[in-house]
Image (cartoon, grey):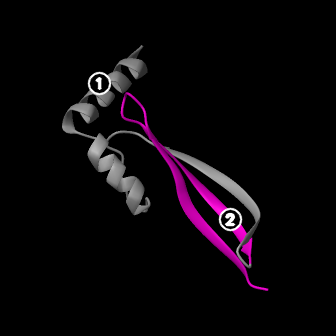
Amino acid sequence: MAITKEKVIDQITVTENGIVLYREATRIMEDGNELSKTYHRSSLTPGQDLTGIPANVVAHCNVAWTAEVIAAYQAQASRTVGA
């Protein structure tokens, strides 16, 4: 009877303004059967530091976050803060 814990990124979404949303599932398994599963959701804004972020999420960010997307997001954010 082997009990294991595995974490996987099971969902990655990029919104129209470049925000990357991802979900990490933590599964507790016993002999290949899932006993429980919990989720942790996170979001990343264009240009954000990616230190410590899972590699597959970073790969999506690197594709989605062009210089134009980062500039547009920062311009939008500065308009929102100044409003």
Relative horizontal placement of residue 25, taking residue 73 as reference (left or right): right
Seen from the viewer's position, the closer of residues 13 and 79 is 13
Secondary structure category for the residue under label 1: helix
Bounds of the magenta span? Answer: 1-30
| Residue shown at 62% from the left, 70% from the top | 6
Q: Is residue 28 magenta?
A: yes
| Residue shown at 69% from the left, 77% from the top | 4
| Magenta span: chief secondary structure | strand
Residue 83 coordinates in the image, percent (x, y)? 42, 13
Mark pair 1, 2: CA separation:
40 Å
Residue 40 coordinates in the image, percent (x, y)? 62, 52
- Furthest-top residue in this view: 83
**Above-or-below relation of 71 to 20:** above
Secondary structure category for the residue under label 2: strand
Report which residue position mark 1 lands on: 75
Q: Is residue 35 magenta?
A: no
Report which residue position mark 2 lands on: 27
Residue 53 coordinates in the image, percent (x, y)? 43, 59
